């Protein structure tokens, strides 16, 4: 048995190691600076309660992006030196973010051990490679991201750190082979358990969904299916679940081999970056030369986000979570006894609100950040939640979960088609969405991003919008001068959230204009870094007249778009006559 010693290394702090909800994300070249990673990892160990480090079990894995394998070895050596009892590593250092959450919550080691936390190595939907992004975040014992109390402590530690501890003579672990390696150090035995990356997550999915009914749907010749992992970690789960468990053809999978640079692409599941899937589904600019599949979906780099498509049909993330919630009890066994409640992030459309009201469900509107959903779930208040940025999930784990969302949609399709598999025509994704609109109304929705705006100008624009809110009659007068066909504003505020579980208050979460007819305008500022700020404008037109829910989205939104741009004085403050990105 290899015996290791603990080495104490002196270091100096780095500026800017402030982790957000999604951890610390920087360019690989920044992380590769001597001691940069070591400082952040040691600051994290120092921020945790002693019993969550000494003698504890930690998970270390991620989305497989460039630099991950080096980082895994460094964290293993630092964990050993800090008195951790064992480290669990997914084979080839691969674990999706939802799978990490599942492993923390569900996996029991051969010796009865349970994980108390995890270092997840991901920069989510950001590109990977030597000159691209790397990220590291810490998740807690409930499987969810570290709360602000911990991330604030980590950041404070990074500013004063003088030393870190590492077991430099510990040999590198072969993480390509499932095995347990045992070592001995000053505080006793230390194990590294390399385990199969898919087993625990697949077992959890099989306990939630009726795989038999989904299998029948996938075996129906009229039902065709396509899944694009964008060369992220979702690929290993797609092969295991869709092909091996559910019997889909391997040809249904696109870009399902994880690559450290995501094949040179941008692993963000939206209509802009999932080009190959979008074209195959008949939504490309040139149309498709082949008949598109009935159902398509994509994942981001770490597999927590999802995009859902029907044949020549895009499902907005806001509609997706509402439709899953409306159909979950009858279509998904896990929810058969009913939903505890539902929640959405504030910028997400109010489609879920209407479902909650109709079904008599508890409903929560929270700031952007998955930790707010986690609090509700830990308190037993929320079953299903989602956000407009392609994140959907449930209380089975404490992260958003891309493959769960795909299985939820396949379950709904299987349920709607259970007596129609031999008919001439199946119920399609588009049929389900249009029927939902007929029952609940349609929330026409778009997001305008104005990127790299001068930070000062962005703050002035936001201040202008807050000042306007002091007189609703003045706001309505201005709006009527811009567009007489837009409803009056009933309420305007700066969104503030008091957490019903821990009582914490989150202020300045976005500026809202709520209209009498259920429409909304939301303005948010994000990222006031060296490259300026991003102003996000969320524009939502509610239509409950069933004869008007089939309009072109841009046409239906045009009046409110004009109001948003002119009311905010976007051009006057920023000089921008058009957004950088329209979603």
Image: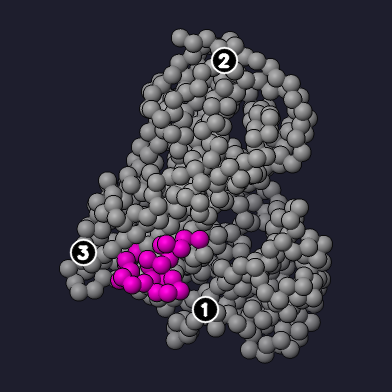
Secondary structure of the residue carrying tag 1 is: helix
Which residue is identified by label 1?
A: 553
Q: Quadrant for residue 113, please give it.
A: top left
Residue 284 in the magenta stretch? The answer is: yes
- Identify the residue shown where x is 51% and y is 18%: 171
Residue 326: x %, y % from top left? 42, 65
Regarding residue 110, the answer to whether it shows in the image is yes
Q: How many marks?
A: 3
Residue at numbered disc 3:
221
Magenta-drawn segment? 273-295
Indicate which disc, 1 or 3, sits on the residue closer to the N terminus: 3
* 159 in the magenta segment: no
**Earlier-in-chain disc, 1 versus 2:** 2
Q: Position of residue 197 (x, y in %)?
A: 40, 36
Classed neighbour count for the residue bearing mark 3: other residues with Cα under 10 Å, few (<14), some (14–19), many (≥20): few
Residue at 43% over, 19% down: 181
Lateral position of residue 72 relative to residue 282, left or right: right
Along the line of sight, which residue is nearer the eye, 452 or 86?
Answer: 452
Q: Quadrant of residue 575?
A: bottom right
Residue under the image location 38 percent in, 23 percent down: 179
Percent across and percent down for residue 3 are: 52, 9
* Residue placed under numbered mark 2 in the picture: 169
Looking at the image, residue 420 lies above or below residue 149? below
């Amino acid at each position: 048995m290899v015996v290791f010693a603990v080495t104490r290394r002196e270091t100096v702090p780095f500026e800017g190691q402030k982790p957000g909800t999604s951890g610390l994300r920087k360019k690989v070249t920044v992380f590769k600076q001597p001691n940069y990673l070591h400082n952040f990892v040691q600051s994290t160990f120092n921020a945790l309660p002693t019993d969550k480090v000494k003698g504890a079990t930690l998970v270390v894995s991620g989305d497989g992006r460039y630099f991950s394998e080096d980082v895994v070895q460094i964290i293993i050596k630092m964990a050993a030196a800090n008195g951790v009892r064992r480290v669990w590593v997914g084979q080839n250092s691969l674990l999706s973010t939802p799978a990490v959450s599942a492993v923390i919550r569900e996996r029991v080691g051969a010796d009865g051990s349970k994980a108390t936390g995890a270092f997840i190595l991901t920069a989510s939907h950001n590109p990977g490679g030597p000159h691209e992004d790397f990220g590291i975040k810490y998740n807690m014992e409930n499987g969810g991201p570290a709360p602000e109390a911990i991330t604030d402590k980590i950041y404070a530690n990074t500013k004063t750190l003088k030393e870190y501890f590492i077991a430099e003579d510990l040999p590198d672990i072969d993480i390509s082979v499932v095995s347990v390696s045992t070592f001995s150090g000053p505080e006793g035995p230390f194990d590294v358990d390399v385990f199969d990356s898919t087993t625990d997550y697949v077992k959890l999915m099989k306990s939630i969904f009726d795989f038999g009914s989904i299998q029948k749907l996938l075996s129906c010749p009229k039902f065709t299916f396509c899944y694009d992992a964008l060369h992220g970690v979702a690929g290993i789960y797609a092969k295991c679940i869709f092909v091996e468990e559910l019997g889909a053809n391997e040809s249904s999978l696109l870009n399902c081999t994880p690559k450290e640079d995501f094949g040179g692409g941008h692993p963000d599941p939206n209509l802009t970056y999932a080009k190959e899937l979008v074209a195959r589904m008949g939504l490309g600019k040139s149309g498709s030369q082949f008949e598109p599949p009935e159902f398509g979906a994509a994942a981001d780099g770490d597999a927590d986000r999802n995009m859902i498509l029907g044949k020549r049909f895009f499902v907005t993330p806001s509609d997706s979570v509402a439709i899953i919630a409306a159909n979950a009890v009858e279509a998904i066994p896990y929810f058969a006894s009913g939903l505890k409640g539902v929640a959405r992030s504030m910028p997400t459309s109010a489609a879920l609100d209407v479902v909650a009201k109709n079904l008599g469900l508890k409903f929560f509107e929270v700031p952007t950040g998955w930790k707010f959903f986690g609090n509700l779930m830990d308190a037993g208040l929320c079953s299903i939640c989602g956000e407009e940025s392609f994140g959907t999930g449930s209380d089975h784990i404490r992260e958003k979960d891309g493959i769960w969302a795909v299985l939820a949609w396949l379950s709904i399709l299987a349920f709607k088609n259970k007596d129609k598999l031999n008919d001439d025509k199946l119920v399609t994704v588009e049929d389900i969405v249009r029927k939902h609109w007929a029952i609940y109304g349609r929330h026409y929705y778009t997001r305008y991003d104005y990127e790299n705006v001068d930070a000062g100008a962005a703050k002035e624009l936001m201040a202008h919008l807050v000042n306007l809110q002091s007189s609703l009659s003045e706001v309505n007068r201005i709006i009527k001068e811009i567009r007489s066909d837009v409803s009056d504003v009933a309420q305007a505020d700066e969104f503030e959230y008091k957490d019903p579980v821990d009582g914490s208050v989150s202020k300045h979460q976005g500026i809202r204009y709520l209209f009498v007819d259920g429409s909304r305008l939301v303005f948010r500022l994000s990222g006031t870094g060296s490259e300026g700020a991003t102003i996000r404008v969320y524009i939502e037109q509610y239509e409950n007249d069933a004869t008007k829910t089939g309009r072109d989205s841009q046409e239906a939104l045009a009046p409110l778009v004009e109001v948003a741009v002119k009311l905010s004085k976007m051009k006057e403050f920023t000089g921008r006559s058009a957004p950088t990105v329209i979603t």
